[in-house]
Image (tube, rainbow, N blue to C red):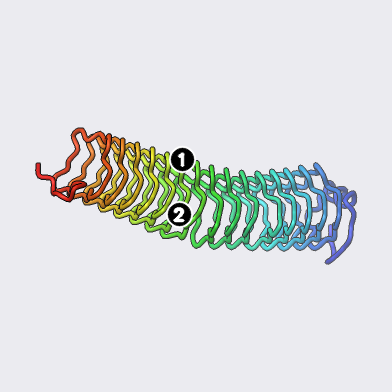
Amino acid sequence: MNPVPVQSTINAQELLNRYLAGERDFKNVNLIGAHLCHVNLVGIDLAGASLARANLTRALLHEVNFTNAFLYGSNLSFVKLGRGQLKDADLTKANLEGAFLVKSQMSGVKLSGAILRGVNLRASNLQGVNLCGANLSGVNLRSANLTRANLNWANLSQAKLSGAILKETQMTGINLSSAYLSEVDLQGFDLSGVNFSQALMTRINLQDADLTAANLSQTQLEQGNLQRAKLQDANLVEADLLSSNLTDAVLIRADLSFAILTHGTLMGANLNLATLRKADLRGANLQNAYLWKADLSEANLEGANLYGASLRGANLQGVNLTNVNLAGATLPDGTIYKA
């Protein structure tokens, strides 16, 4: 059969009849407002097609080619579109709630005003995509490529981002509360003021990242790399930093009340004026750390290494200092501890 002519207008029934007859090439077809709910169009070529306001709810669209397609305001909720080609497609104000877009190519796609709740974009290519201010709550972006994507002010609460590629991604004002960020590389990122509360961030790389005033309360940061991270005024209340590396991190005025820092590495960390009330620091390495006027009341420092640390003016009321190494440390009264 011959390809559909450029800008050829057909209705939904004609499309389905021709598809069932074996035709797959429908480039540039005009299907504006077409009703295509629950249809099976696997492998169809709709590159450059006009599908504005079309209803494709729960359609089976695996491996469909939507390159440069115009899907403004279309309803793609709960569609199955694995390995789809959506490069440079216009999905402005489209409804993609619950859509399955695993391993789809979406570089350059327009998603302004789109509904993206619960979308499955695992391992998809989203390079350069503009998702500024988008509601991506619960979206699955595991192993997705978000290189140079704009996620400023986006809502990614409860989103799954483990293993995602975030090179040069813009993340100002992003909401990552309760998100999954295991093994994500955010080295050197500006994440000041970002909400990470209750996020799962095990083995994350935040080396040299700026987390000034960030909300990291109740986060799971076990085995995280936070070397030289800027965490001044950050909220780390009840954060789990088991075995994390905070060497030379800046934690001035940070609130680490009830935080778990067991076996953590805090060598040279600046904890001046920080709150560590009832924190668990058993076995932690605080060698040469700065703790001027830090509140360590009722903290557990059993077996910790405070060799050469500065504790001048620190509050040590009720602290467990069993088997602590204080050799060369400056004590709260300004004297040097001598074993």
For residue 327, which numbered disc appears in the image? Answer: none
Quick one: 145 or 103, which is closer to the camera?
A: 145
Which residue occupies the extreme left position in the image? 339
Number of the front mark, 2 or 1: 2
In the drawing, does residue 84 fall left or right of residue 148? Answer: right
Image point (65%, 46%), residue name: 119
In the drawing, does residue 163 fall left or right of residue 108? Answer: left
| Element marked by disc 2 | loop
Q: Position of residue 126 (x, y in %)?
A: 59, 57
For residue 218, which numbered disc appears in the image? Answer: 1
Q: Earlier in the sequence, mark 2 or mark 1?
A: 2
In the drawing, does residue 285 fall left or right of residue 216? Answer: left
Q: Which residue is mark 2?
A: 213
Give the Cα distance between marks 2 and 1.
15 Å
In the drawing, does residue 9 fall left or right of residue 127? Answer: right
From what the image shows, is residue 223 above or below residue 26? above
Q: Position of residue 93 (x, y in %)?
A: 74, 56
Image point (78%, 56%), residue name: 73
Quadrant of the drawing holding the C terminus: top left
Image point (41%, 43%), residue name: 221
Q: Position of residue 297 (x, y in %)?
A: 31, 39
Displayed quadrant of residue 303: top left
Q: Position of residue 193 (x, y in %)?
A: 49, 55
Packing grade of label 1 (10 A; few <14, some 14-19, many >=20) is: many
From what the image shows, is residue 205 above or below residue 317? below
